[in-house]
Amino acid sequence: MYPMTVPTQNSHRVVLLTPERKLSETTRLADMTADALDHAREALSLTPGLEPDTQAALRAELRAVERHVTGRRILSDVARADLSAFIEAARYLLDTQSPEEILGTMLQAIGEAYDRSLRVTDLIAAEAEIAALRAPQS
């Protein structure tokens, strides 16, 4: 933020301008994980708006996603497999039935949850691999 006026008295100001620094992804791992859970929770909250036959077709996938959200565990391979199963089932329903706007919104939210979960685990794996390379070889 820059000063809007320049003082006219016999005084001076020192203004230190520092650019906003964006936090690196590795420092935001917890936030990214919470975002993934939030996206999955948002998708689940839309379930009552689905047509009954769509709800029935996605019952198993919705229950699996709900288990992970309830347990607040979305970084495991099992959680990502369940998110992926929901994505595949929802895409199939969107392609074969009349498209539901709510299902499309749910698909987008679950896709975001999947992407963020995958990104966090990729960053954690990268950190572990770098630490192993930096460790002294014995």
Image (spheres, rainbow, N blue to C red):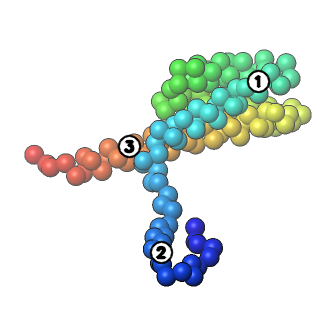
Q: Nearer the viewer, residue 57 or 1?
A: 1
Residue at 42% across / 48% down in the picture?
Answer: 26
Q: Nearer the viewer, residue 66 or 54?
A: 66
Does residue 52 show up?
A: yes
Assess disc 3: are there few (<14), some (14-19) or many (≥20) residues with their C-alpha within 10 Å of its C-alpha.
Answer: few
Type of the residue with mark 2: Arg
Residue 25 image offset from top left, x and y in percent: 47, 50
Q: Is residue 34 above or below residue 9?
A: above
Type of the residue with mark 3: Ala
Type of the residue with mark 1: Thr
Determine the image quadrant of residue 43: top right
Q: Which mark is residue 47?
A: 1
Residue 98 image offset from top left, x and y in percent: 89, 34
**Which secondary structure lies at badge 2?**
loop
Q: Nearer the viewer, residue 22 or 60?
A: 22
Tell whether label 1 touches label 2 (CB within 8 Å): no
Determine the CA span between mark 2 and mark 3: 48 Å
Q: Which residue is mark 2?
A: 13
Determine the CA span between mark 3 and mark 1: 34 Å
Assess disc 2: are there few (<14), some (14-19) or many (≥20) residues with their C-alpha within 10 Å of its C-alpha.
Answer: few
Q: Which mark is residue 125?
A: 3
Q: Earlier in the sequence, mark 3 or mark 1?
A: 1
Q: Earlier in the sequence, mark 2 or mark 1?
A: 2
Q: Is residue 70 left or right of residue 77?
A: right
Q: Earlier in the sequence, mark 2 or mark 3?
A: 2
Residue at 53% across / 25% down in the picture?
Answer: 72
